[in-house]
């Protein structure tokens, strides 16, 4: 049976949101997202950016994931030159490190930070103690408004069996809670 507005009132704890930039941001902020560091060594220098737009399971054959990068990024034009990208899935205890690596000041990003270059020889960078990481190649880039959507194809991956992921929700970091059942 179709429902009409008269038979399905909008709950009182819901409010309409205009779909201007700020309103869209508020709605999108209600969707939890994992946070990743994307990195590689390029021209002998570490290049890392942080994204909460990382999505997995885009395709299983071939395996594909994606993330979106603002077109105003000063890091991405250099980072995309790397043959492989290390994608580290931040762990719950890495909130401060995540904030530091996302600093707009490139010099502050790496102060007292230990990053690792993968053993594969591709110069991908990973964040130690992350909850998992992938080594990926760029599969495709797609124009998407004020962002570029980057599809990546993982070539290898590792997970920690004893860690929880860092989650971004409602414009702040949160932790997962266990289901009591």
Image (cartoon, helix red, strand yellow):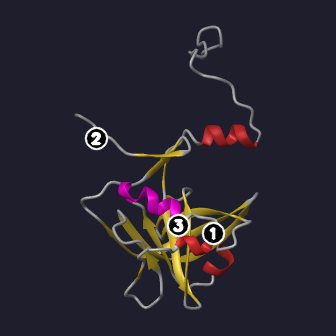
Q: Residues within 10 Å of mark 3 (few under 14, many from 20)?
A: many
Of residue 47 and residue 27, the one placed in the foreground of this image is: 47
The residue to which callout 3 is attached is: 101
**Residue visible at 53% across and 42% down?**
31
Q: Which mark is residue 41?
A: none
From what the image shows, is residue 143 above or below residue 47? above
* Among the 4 quarters of the image, the one containing residue 149: bottom right
- Residue marked by disc 1: 105
Q: Secondary structure at mark 3?
A: helix
Extreme residue in the top direction: 6
Which residue is denoted by mark 2 in the rendering? 178
For label 1, count other residues whose C-alpha is less than 10 Å away and answer few (under 14), some (14-19) or many (20+): few
Q: Position of residue 118 (x, y in %)?
A: 40, 83
Of the two numbered discs 3 and 2 on the same chain, state the one appearing first in sequence.
3
Which of the image's four quarters has the C terminus?
A: top left
Query: Does residue 56 appear in the picture of this structure?
Result: no
In this rendering, which labeled residue sits more in front, label 3 or label 2? 3
Mark 2: give few (<14), some (14-19) or many (20+) Cα within 10 Å. few
Residue 143 percent across, percent down from the top left: 73, 64
Q: Is residue 74 left or right of residue 40?
A: right
**Residue 54 at x, y = what percent?**
53, 59
Q: What's drawn in magenta, residue-wise? A: 91-101
């Amino acid at each position: 049976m179709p429902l009409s507005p008269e038979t399905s009132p909008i709950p009182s704890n819901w409010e309409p949101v205009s779909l201007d930039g700020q309103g869209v941001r508020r709605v999108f902020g209600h969707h939890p997202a994992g946070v990743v560091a994307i990195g590689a060594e390029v021209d002998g220098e570490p290049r890392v950016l942080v994204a909460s737009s990382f999505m997995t399971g885009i395709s299983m054959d071939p395996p594909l994931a994606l993330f979106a990068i603002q077109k105003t990024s000063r890091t991405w034009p250099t980072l995309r030159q790397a043959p492989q990208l290390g994608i580290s899935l931040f762990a719950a205890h890495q909130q401060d490190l995540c904030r530091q690596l996302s600093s707009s000041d490139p010099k502050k990003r790496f102060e007292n930070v230990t990053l690792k270059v993968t053993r594969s020889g591709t110069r991908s960078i990973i964040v130690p103690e992350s909850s998992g990481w992938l080594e990926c190649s760029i599969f495709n880039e797609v124009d998407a408004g004020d962002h570029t959507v980057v599809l990546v194809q993982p070539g290898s991956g590792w997970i920690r069996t004893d860690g929880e992921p860092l989650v971004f929700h409602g414009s702040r970091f949160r932790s997962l809670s266990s289901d009591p059942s």
